[in-house]
Amino acid sequence: MPALGKAALAATVLLTAACSAPPPAPPVAAPPAAAAAAGWSPAPVVPLPSQPPPSLVVDEPLPEQLAMGLVVLRYRAENLRVVPVYGPAALDVSPRIGHIHVTVDDAAWHWADGSGEPLIIQSLPAGPHKVWIGLADPTHKILDQKTVNFVVPAHAGHH
């Protein structure tokens, strides 16, 4: 067999062997318990067999904005996704969903928000204030709540 023919035959044999080898095994995914222990929360795409109770975390107002008379409150819900979905049928959604209720300075009214974005309140007069935030299920039942007290400085400008 000519030298070129032997080289072509060897290349064909190697190529055939490489193509017929079984594909590498996919990486083994961490079991859900291990993923949770590593700081991963379950993907919010499948129903969960059980869920810990929801809780609300609220930061103090951002000081730079408060000095300008603008109240910016960052919050997050744990074990609940904040979305604008309401009504009894939404109670069966898993992972759990809900929204927040907000009251400023013990007003007789509140508003509901399902955006999950920071609360921004402006034009409060100088002096002490408080904002109550309630984490609610889709039927408006309060699941957790926090009150943030702060003082708008006298020299704060309005936006």
Image (tube, rainbow, N blue to C red):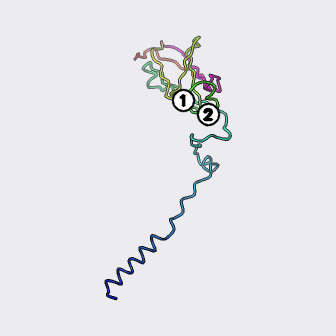
Q: Is residue 15 magenta?
A: no
Q: Magenta region: which residues?
A: 125-147
Q: Nearer the viewer, residue 96 or 35?
A: 96
Residue under label 2? 93
- Badge 2: how crowded within 10 Å, few (<14), some, or many (20+)? few
Give percent across and percent down for residue 133.
58, 22
Secondary structure beneath dot 1 equals: loop
Secondary structure beneath dot 2 equals: loop
Give percent across and percent down for residue 59.
54, 29
- Whether the residues at callouts 2 and 1 have beta carbons within 8 Å, the answer is no
Q: Nearer the viewer, residue 45 or 68?
A: 45
- Residue occupying the far top of the picture: 108
Q: Is residue 60 above or below residue 95?
A: above
Q: Residue at x 42, y 20 (%)?
A: 68
Q: Is residue 118 above or below residue 32?
A: above
Q: Is residue 90 above or below residue 121?
A: below
Q: Is residue 12 left or right of residue 111?
A: left
- Give the number of the mark in front: 2 or 1: 2
Amino acid type of the residue tagged 1 in the rendering: Val
Residue under label 1? 83
Which comes before the other along the chain, label 2 or label 1?
1
Amino acid type of the residue tagged 2 in the rendering: Val
Count the marks.
2
Give percent across and percent down for residue 159.
40, 17
- Residue occupying the far bottom of the picture: 1
Q: Quadrant of the N terminus?
A: bottom left
Q: Quadrant of residue 140?
A: top right
Q: Quadrant of residue 3?
A: bottom left
Q: Which mark is residue 117?
A: none
What is the C-alpha distance between the residues marked 2 and 1? 12 Å
Q: Quadrant of residue 53?
A: top right
